[in-house]
Amino acid sequence: MNKKDLVNEVAKVVSTKKEAQAAVDCILSSISDAMKKGDSVTLVGFGTFKPVKREARKGRNPQTGAPIDIKARRVPKFTPGKALKDAVN
C-alpha cells in the first residue's frame, strides 16, 4: 500500500477524496514535526515513532576499502505496538 492507496481507504470513511488527502497529509506532517522537535509520537495499539541518536563511527568505503568517518545524526525509529504485532501474525 502506498500513500495514494491510503488516501483512497480514508476517502471511503470521509465524504471526499480531497478531505482524505488533507487528513493523511496532516497526520504525516504532524508526526514529522514532532520528531523534528525530538518528541516521540505514540499511537496506542499501532506503535511509537521516535527520533534516535546514532553516534559518530568509523566506516569503510565499499568500493575502495578506505576508512571514512560517519557523522552522528538522528534517525527515525518505529516500534510497533502489541495490537499491530498481533494483527500481522
Image: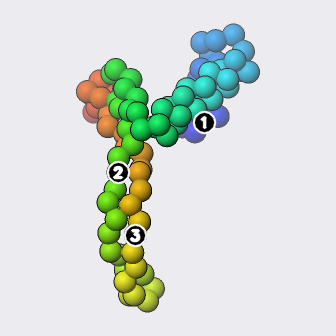
Q: Is residue 49 above or below residue 12?
A: below
> Relative to the observer, which residue lies in front, 28 or 21?
28
Residue at figure coordinates x 40%, y 33% from the top left: 39
Which quadrant would residue 43 be assigned to in this image? top left
For residue 3, the mark is: 1
Question: Callout 2: helix, strand or loop?
Answer: strand
Q: Residue at x 38, y 32 (%)?
A: 40
Q: Percent from the top left, x then y, of residue 56?
A: 34, 65
Secondary structure type for disc 1? helix
What amino acid type is highlighted by mark number 2? Lys
The residue under the point 49% across, 40% down is 36
Badge 2 density bin: few <14, some 14–19, many ≥20, Cα 10 Å = few
**Labels 3 and 2: the sequence-earlier one:** 2
Q: Is residue 6 visible in this depiction of the protein?
A: no
Q: Horizontally, is 18 left or right of 83 in the view?
A: right
Which residue bears the numbered disc 3?
70
Q: Which residue is mark 2?
A: 53
Circles 3 and 1: CB atoms closer than 8 Å: no
- Which callout, 3 or 1, points at the residue further toward the start of the chain? 1
Horizontal relation, residue 74 to residue 23: left or right:
left
Q: Residue at x 39, y 43 (%)?
A: 51
Three-letter residue code for mark 3: Ile
How far apart are labels 3 and 1 at the CA level?
Answer: 32 Å
